[in-house]
């Protein structure tokens, strides 16, 4: 018998926008391999305000208040683009938001009178795929989210692995070239996977192609004043442009080098690849699998499956809803 359906408020806080949704979702029954996804009853996107901690907090409160008008929610889940103290319910460090050390969970619980949970956004997306999506049924899985950077999530033995202080899961910072370019953001390392296979890396590859060959598809787009970026790279590759396909395959091969280390270490059953940067699908995942098959240790490389995420643009709110459902309402 399927579990009771719950109503949840789910918020995906991004560096530039906040997506909030009122969501109806039920914990899938054991053995249900393709459960009904959460239903978005009400959905709103607003710009993130980062001028001050107070203003940032106010936009999150306003976004929540807006969706909560749509029905009686039982709990609130939030995905944050930050390092999160999961037990303490606060953001520890964030390059995107001025919310460090604010007791966000407790403030929201008090403001709305509802139980609230927050976690890193990539971890929340991983929970969303594990409960409702491509990771359903797997006890050991990794998820990589290819966004501006690369986020990661780990499920080990059926449970989220957060590490000693909640900072685990930075799968984008596995090094694939110790002499490589500096890693952007707060990472002091060089040559991390994030440098080679993130959305930012795809933007750079598109621009490089445009400058190298002004008469190619990228060069013509640049001359016409159109955006020359990762989405263009993916679109041209999917349309069959050879230059774009080759660039995406190179990025996929870099992804495969990173996956090789991760699969060797974690021996997962499944690796789920999501985020806007994964829109090239098999054009990206095919070359990644080929590198993993050639370079990975046995038996890990033979046992793992590398699959695309089920959820696309809704992955953030689905993850936040799955987080609230599993942490606050399960059982
Ligand atoms: Zn790094």
Image (cartoon, rainbow, N blue to C red):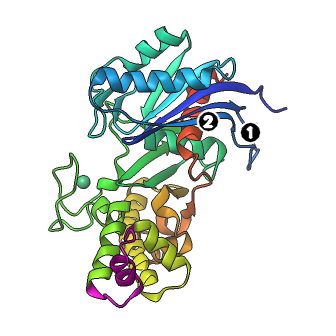
Q: Quadrant of residue 254?
A: bottom left
Name which residue lies at 48% across and 55% down.
Answer: 275
Magenta run includes residue 216? yes
Q: Position of residue 270 (x, y in %)?
A: 55, 57
**To which residue does mark 1 refer?**
30
**To which residue does mark 2 refer?**
43
Vertical comparison of 262 with 20: above or below: below
- Report the quarter where the C terminus lies: top right
Where does the magenta region start and end? 212-229
Relative to 198, is 77 on the left or the right? right
Name which residue lies at 52% across and 70% down.
Answer: 280
Q: Residues within 10 Å of mark 1 (few under 14, many from 20)?
A: few
Q: Nearer the viewer, residue 121 or 286?
A: 121
Which mark sits nearer the N-terminus, 2 or 1? 1
Q: Position of residue 289 (x, y in %)?
A: 49, 73
Q: Position of residue 7 (x, y in %)?
A: 69, 25
């Amino acid at each position: 018998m399927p579990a009771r359906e719950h109503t949840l408020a789910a918020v995906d806080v991004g560096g530039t926008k906040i997506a909030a949704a009122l969501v109806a979702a039920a914990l899938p029954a054991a053995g249900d391999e393709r459960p009904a996804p959460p239903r978005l009853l009400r959905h709103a996107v607003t710009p993130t305000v980062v001028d001050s901690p107070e203003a940032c907090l106010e936009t999150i409160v306003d976004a929540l208040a807006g969706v909560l008008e749509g029905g009686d929610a039982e709990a609130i889940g939030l995905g944050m683009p930050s390092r999160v103290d999961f037990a303490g319910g606060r953001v520890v460090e964030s390059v995107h938001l001025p919310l460090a050390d604010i007791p966000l969970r407790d403030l929201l619980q008090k403001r709305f009178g509802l139980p609230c949970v927050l976690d890193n956004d990539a971890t929340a997306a991983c929970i969303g795929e594990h409960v409702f999506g491509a990771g359903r049924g797997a006890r050991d899985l990794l998820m990589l989210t290819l966004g501006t950077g690369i986020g990661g999530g780990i499920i080990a033995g059926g449970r989220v692995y957060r590490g000693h202080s909640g900072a685990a899961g930075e799968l984008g910072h596995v090094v694939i070239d110790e002499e490589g370019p500096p890693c952007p953001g707060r990472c002091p390392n060089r040559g991390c996977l994030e440098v080679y296979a993130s959305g930012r890396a795809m933007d750079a590859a598109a621009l490089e192609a445009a400058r190298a060959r002004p008469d190619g598809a990228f060069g013509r787009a640049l001359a016409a004043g159109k955006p020359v970026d990762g989405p263009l790279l993916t679109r041209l590759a999917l349309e069959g442009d050879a230059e774009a396909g080759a660039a995406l395959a190179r990025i996929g091969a870099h992804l495969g080098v990173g996956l090789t280390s991760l699969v060797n270490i974690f021996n997962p059953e499944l690796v789920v690849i999501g985020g806007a940067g994964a829109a090239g699908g098999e054009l990206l995942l095919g070359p990644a699998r080929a590198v993993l098959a050639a370079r990975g240790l046995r038996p890990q490389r033979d046992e793992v499956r590398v699959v695309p995420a089920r959820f696309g643009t809704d992955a953030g709110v689905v993850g936040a809803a799955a987080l609230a459902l599993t942490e606050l309402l399960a059982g």
